[in-house]
Image (spheres, rainbow, N blue to C red):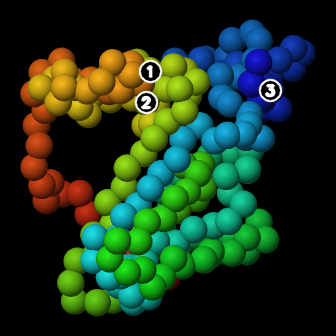
Amino acid sequence: RIWQEDERAPQPGRGALGKDGRWRGGQRLVPDRRVRPPPGLGVNFAVHDIGCQGGPMRLVPGTHTLPFQLGRMAPSMETPMLEQLGLSRVFVCPLRRGDAVLRDLRLWHAGSANAEAGARHFPNAEFLAGWYADLTEGTEDHLAPRPAIPPEVWSQLSPHAQEVSRRVRAEEPLRVGFREDVALPQQFD
């Protein structure tokens, strides 16, 4: 088994945190951070040139092995927390149109403030390992497989492609288009 025991479990005995947030006997339902390969990979694509002032992605090397989950935080809180942990961020720039950034999905990453006049577009595709997709399917996990391939496209795939993409097959046509509310307001450190 590839499960990590949770040191926060009540004593005596060990426990696991279930989907409902309650402790269960046994082991925690979170993959061990030392597991290789990673549970998923993300690929960001530069669809236009991205300069170092144009909102480049920032990464914090080594965070994919931390035993806790880092959530969203205000940029003003990020720097002191990274310094306390002895970590530092790197900025992925400049990028040229057509460049791709491949990363472990567990790696702490974020966009940075865009000081240029135009919008910065850096779309992302995520690919889950089969074992992680099996583990999270049907859960509220933000990486759980969701419908992404319309039935009319899925039916044209080879049998092998249909098998590996079965978790993301949509049962009905998907709503598509551009979301105006996808961007968060810029905040500067």
Residue highlighted by disc 1? 137
Alpha carbon separation for disc pair 3 and 2: 22 Å
| 163 or 4, nearer to the observer | 163
Dot 2: element: loop
Q: Where is residue 128 drawn, in percent x and y?
A: 49, 36
Q: Quadrant of residue 48?
A: bottom left
Residue highlighted by disc 3? 5
Marks 1/2 in contact by CB < 8 Å: the verdict is yes
Q: Residue at x 55, y 57 (%)?
A: 103
Q: Which mark is residue 144?
A: 2
Q: Where is residue 147 drawn, in percent x and y?
A: 27, 28
Of the residues shown, which amino acid type is indicated by label 3? Glu
Q: Residue at x 52, y 47 (%)?
A: 41
Dot 3: element: loop
Q: Quadrant of residue 26?
A: top right
Left or right of residue 64, residue 76 in this image: left
Q: Where is residue 46 drawn, in percent x and y?
A: 34, 70
Camera-side mark, 3 or 2: 2
Q: Residues within 10 Å of mark 2 (few under 14, many from 20)?
A: some
